[in-house]
Structures are given as C-alpha cells and as structure tokens.
Image (spheres, coloured by chain):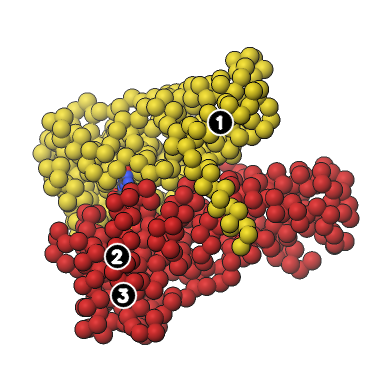
Amino acid sequence: MGFFNKLKSSLTKTRKSFTEKIEQLVIGYADINEECLDELEEILISADVGVHTTMKLMDDVRAGIKKKEINSPQDLQPFLIKRIGEILSTGEDKACIAQTGPTVLLVIGVNGVGKTTTIGKLAKYYKNKNKSVILAAADTFRAAAIDQLQIWGNRANADVIAHTEGADPAAVVFDALKAAISRKADILIIDTAGRLHTKANLMDELNKIYRVIKREIPDAPHETLLILDATTGQNAIHQAELFTKAAPISGVILTKLDGTAKGGVVIGIKEQLAMPVKWIGVGEGEDDLQPFDAEDFATALFEK
Amino acid sequence: MIFESLAEKLQNTFKKLRGHGRLSAEDVNAAMRDIRMALLEADVNFKVVKSFVAKIKERAIGANILESLTPAQAVIKIVNEELTELMGGTVSRINIAANPPTIIMMVGLQGAGKTTSVGKLGTMLKKQGKHPLFVAADVYRPAAVKQLQVIGKQLDIPVFSMAEGSNPVTIAEKSLEHAHSHANDVVIIDTAGRLHINEELMQELKFIKDNVHPHEILLVVDAMTGQDAVNVAESFNADLGLDGVVLTKMDGDARGGAALSVKAVTGCPIKFVGTGEKLDALEPFYPDRMASRILDMGDVLSLIEKA
Ligand SMILES: Nc1nc2c(ncn2[C@@H]2O[C@H](COP(=O)(O)OP(=O)(O)OP(=O)(O)O)[C@@H](O)[C@H]2O)c(=O)[nH]1
Ligand SMILES: Nc1nc2c(ncn2[C@@H]2O[C@H](COP(=O)(O)OP(=O)(O)OP(=O)(O)O)[C@@H](O)[C@H]2O)c(=O)[nH]1
Ligand SMILES: [Mg+2]
Ligand SMILES: [Mg+2]
C-alpha cells in the first residue's frame, strides 16, 4: 500500500494549476536543461496531447532553442501556445451552408460523448439566428433516445422527425430529409446512435445513413460532425480515423470542457488527421456551446 | 497507423545492447523508456507511470535472466507481474447486506454508462435469484427517468420514480420504504452524471449517501478516459468513499490505461467491466487480461509462461 500513498501525495501536488507549474518551471530553472524539458513534456502528456504529438512538439522546442527563438524558460510557454495554436488553426473552417434547400448536419460519435445534447444546443443556436430547424431522431436503439431528443426539440422549438424505438435509422433519415425539403427548413440536424468505431456492422449502418442523405441531396451532408468527449484519451484518434471512413468528417466538436480534462487529444487529431475543430461544449445547458478558438484553447491547455 | 507493440520495442532495444546474464543499469534505462512510452500511449496517468516505472527499474536491475529467456522477455515478465499485482485480485462481488435490502449506488461523470450499468447489474442479480428495484434519482438529464423505465421494462424489474421536481435525496429515501413493502432485496440507485468539480452536485451525492447508507458505491468509468481519470476517481473517492469500479465500453479498442490509473489512486477494486450496450454485457474483471491489454502484449505472454 506504500505505493498508493506515495502516489496520492504526489498527485495532490500535480492537481495544482498547470500555470503554476509552468511558472515554477520558469522560476525553478535559470536555464533550459533536460530536467526542465522533461517537466514540460509531462505537462503536455498530462493534457492528453499523447506521446506522438508531444514528441513532435518537444522536437519543435529543441529546434526553437537551437535557432535562439527560445532563450530562457520564460520563452517556453508563449512558444508552445503559438505552435499549438498554429497546429489547431491550419486549414480552418469553411462553415458549409447549402446554396438552396436545407443545410444538413450529420452528428456522429461513440457512446455517451454528448451528441444529442450538442444537437439541442445547435438547434437553439440556429433558432436564435431565426433559422427554421428540424431534428431527426435516427438513434432508434438507445432506451429513450427519442424522448431525450424530443425534450431538446421542445426547448429549442424545433420539430422532431421520429419513428419508434427499433425502427430503421436510415428510414428515419429519409423521412426527415423529405420533411426538411417540403417544409423548406433551413437546417436539418440528424442525431445518430452512439457506436464504437470498431463495430463493423454499426459503421455500415452509419455509412448507409450517409448514402441515403447523399442520394436525396447530393451536396449533403453539408457538415458531418464528430463529437469527442474532452475526457477521452488517445482512443479519440482511432475514433476519428474509423468514423471518417463511414462518413467523411468535416469537423469535430469537443464536449465536456467544463471539467478538468483539457482535451489535448484534439491536437493529436489535428496534427495527424487535419480535421478542424468547430465548437466546444462547456456544460449541460442549452447555451453551453462556444465557437472554437485555437489560441484560447492553446492557452487553456496550460491552465487549470 | 501501426503501433509497435511493447514486446517488439523492447526486443529492438535489447538487440542494440549487449547485456547478457545480468542486466546493467544502462540496459534497464533504455528499456524503461520503452515501458514508459507504452504505458503513456495506453492512457495510464503519467504520475502513475512514473512511480510504476521506478518500481520496475528497481526489480529489473541486476535481475537474474534465465537462460531460456531473452532480456526483453524477462523485463516484460516483470512488468506484467507488477502490473497484474497492482491491478489487484479478482473481486467481482457485490457486498450483500445481512439485512436486506442491499443498497447499491452508481456514480460517475456524464455519459460514462451508469444507467446502462444499473440495467446490467439488475440482470446479473436477478439471475442470482434476487428481486432488484431500480431507483430513478437522475432528475436532471432529459428523459433519464424514461431511459431507466424502458430498461426496467425490458428486464421486468420495477423502477421507483417520483413526480418531476422531486429531490434526488428524497427519491432515494422513499425508494427504501418501497423496497421494504415490496420485498425487494436489492436497491440500485441511478444518479445523474456529474463533474467531480461540481461541489453542489457532489454534495447531493453525499446527502444521498448519508441518508440511505449504501452498502456499495460504484464509480462508473469509461475505458476510453485519458489522463484525467485520476482526478475524477480521486475526487469521487474523497467525497464518497468508493467500494468498487465498473469499467465500461471495454468492447472497443481503447487500451484502458484508465483502469490502472483509477485503481492506483483509489486502491479500490475494479469489480466489473461493461462489454457492450446490451443489458447482459457485463463481465468480471480479470487483472491479468487487463495488464496484457494495457501493454498490448497479446500472445507474447503465453509464450513467456511456457518458457
Ligand atoms: N458537463 C458537460 N456534460 C455534457 C456536455 N455535453 C453533454 N453532456 C452530458 O453528457 C451526457 C451524455 O450526453 P448525450 O447527449 O446523451 O450523449 P450522446 O452522445 O447522445 O449519447 P448516446 O446517444 O448514448 O451515445 C449527458 O448527461 C449530458 O448532459 C458538456 O459539454 N459538459
Ligand atoms: N459499447 C458500449 N456502450 C456502452 C457500455 N455501457 C454503456 N454504453 C453506452 O454508453 C452510452 C451512455 O450510457 P448511459 O448508461 O446512458 O450513461 P450514463 O452514465 O447513465 O449517462 P448520464 O446519465 O447522461 O450521465 C449509451 O449509448 C450506452 O448504450 C458498454 O459497456 N459498451
Ligand atoms: Mg444520443
Ligand atoms: Mg444516466
């Protein structure tokens, strides 16, 4: 049990804010040495940036030191914020909107990440911009998923197209597309069942939904949004890799950033897969959705 | 992307070295780096990795290397033994109360799999001849009560709920009266997902605990959780005192380093793993399997065992 106790006390220390840690780094090291760089590496790892991307960033830092862009520990944090900001903002974000007819958003992700909740928030956002919004309850699997979406629809004052539990999700999507076209809706947002990216049959089902959308409206879905839970570790990269095979992802929404997890994994996703991050979720309420700001995010990575 | 397994990495590392018979400190350092990386890739918390690697190093330096083993295999063997030990023995039992009902309370972050796990435990206990009652104490999430009711109906297990606007503490309390009068010998309370830093909602859980005195408080943890798992587990444990952990979504390809992190900070056993969305997808936790999953070792271990 000695192991646990030692670990516990060392963890209490790390729970202190990372800003504090960086500041300590700056105070603690007159010069940049290996120990100082090790600590920096730990800060990145502890934010779920992952081994691969952390090593890359550390290489950048070492190169920065050689080029005299980094001369003292003080220079480390601004250097990294800038560098991470660059990684996160490259190729950013053409919000896709239909030229005519409804703009279709397809929302996908593994179980419990916050798809349905985020759809409720998006519905509210578009409603506030005076758009007409329809929601499609294409999660016909999970217990009470339809009821959950209907409650969100009521809150946002958006119509919900639903069949019954157990129905074919592609059929729900088909009806919703028809409804969105005939009612001249501005936005159609499709909720899908949570599914693990490793389940081939469920990925096929998602691909079928994607094809139904394409068949009815060739330039749709205008956005395919992968929802990622900020608490997720390195598995998020596998999720993005495999989901985009079933339905090409146009952007990522990072949820649950109101916790203490820093969602550093999106840096890895961005760096390895070049997918733009569009929104962040910061709570369970209907207004808890914010546009993603690369630089703010990079700064927040170093804070508590 | 192809990840080199730890075994391959270690083999390559040792190929470059000369160490035979006994490992030198230098050999060991190179190997420790491989181990550290592998554990971090598997989402084991970096502080846990640090202490763990230090312990491995101690054992590995000067360790006697059996003739039949390569140094790489010898190190893996040590790592695996330590990892399995750290993960603890097999405890896949619920504390059953001497005087029924046994009260179980499920807690955890949003979306971890609490409500589904309530259904799975109900399935398991019913099979054991118990008469469970589910308690819908999540009054926040849209359609949370309905979700539990649908699950209860599928399993033919009654669900206790109260009118909208009721307080979760009251719901939990009243459910016990219901259980007494309906001869339910197990009560499983589904609580709302919450963040470990939300003081108000953590206080609510404490009130429930103080009023119903659960025999078993289970933290539900998503196997895909990253570095933050330790903060979550530590907070829930500090506020409530946990009796066990349910590790969900193990049917995916997450390496599940969260399991090790959570075990390391709370010390309490991982009792069950969730392996699917269906209500019978609950299995006992096997430390040795988890160890080889975290290290991505597959067949290497069985080879070593035979050697
Ligand atoms: N704290 C916090 N909680 C969130 C956020 N977004 C969603 N949640 C919560 O996460 C839980 C799961 O959200 P859902 O919207 O049901 O997730 P989902 O991806 O639709 O889940 P499935 O359909 O079961 O796969 C709920 O309790 C939500 O209230 C967020 O940004 N912050
Ligand atoms: N693949 C898989 N999915 C799971 C498992 N356990 C739960 N889920 C799914 O994860 C999602 C969230 O599960 P819930 O039981 O609603 O989670 P919760 O913790 O009650 O969520 P909140 O009440 O919103 O905090 C659902 O889609 C479940 O079907 C599991 O072991 N494997
Ligand atoms: Mg959903
Ligand atoms: Mg729930």
Residue A103 versus residue A113 in the image, above or below: above
Q: Which residue is mark 3?
A: B187
Where in the figure is residue A74, as x and y percent of width and height? 56, 21
Asked if badges 2 and 3 are on one and the same chain, I answer: yes
Tag 3 secondary structure: strand
Question: Percent x, y for residue B224?
Answer: 47, 51
Foreground: disc 2 or disc 3: 2
Residue under label 2, please give it.
B208
At horizontal 49% and vertical 25% (from top left) the residue drawn is: A81
**Can you give x and y, in whole percent of width and height, for residue B214 in the image?**
35, 71
Name the tint of chain B in the rendering: red
Say whether residue B89 is visible. yes
Q: Secondary structure at mark 1?
A: helix
**Pointer 3 indicates a residue of which chain?**
B
Q: Identify the hue of chain A.
A: yellow
Q: Residue at x 63, y 27 (%)?
A: A29
Query: Is B280 in front, or is A214?
Result: B280
Disc 1: which residue? A24
Q: Quadrant of the C terminus of chain A?
A: top left
Q: CA distance from mark 1 to mark 2?
A: 41 Å
Neighbour class for label 2 at 10 Å: few (<14), some, many (≥20)? many
Query: Marks 1 and 2: CB-CB under 8 Å?
Result: no
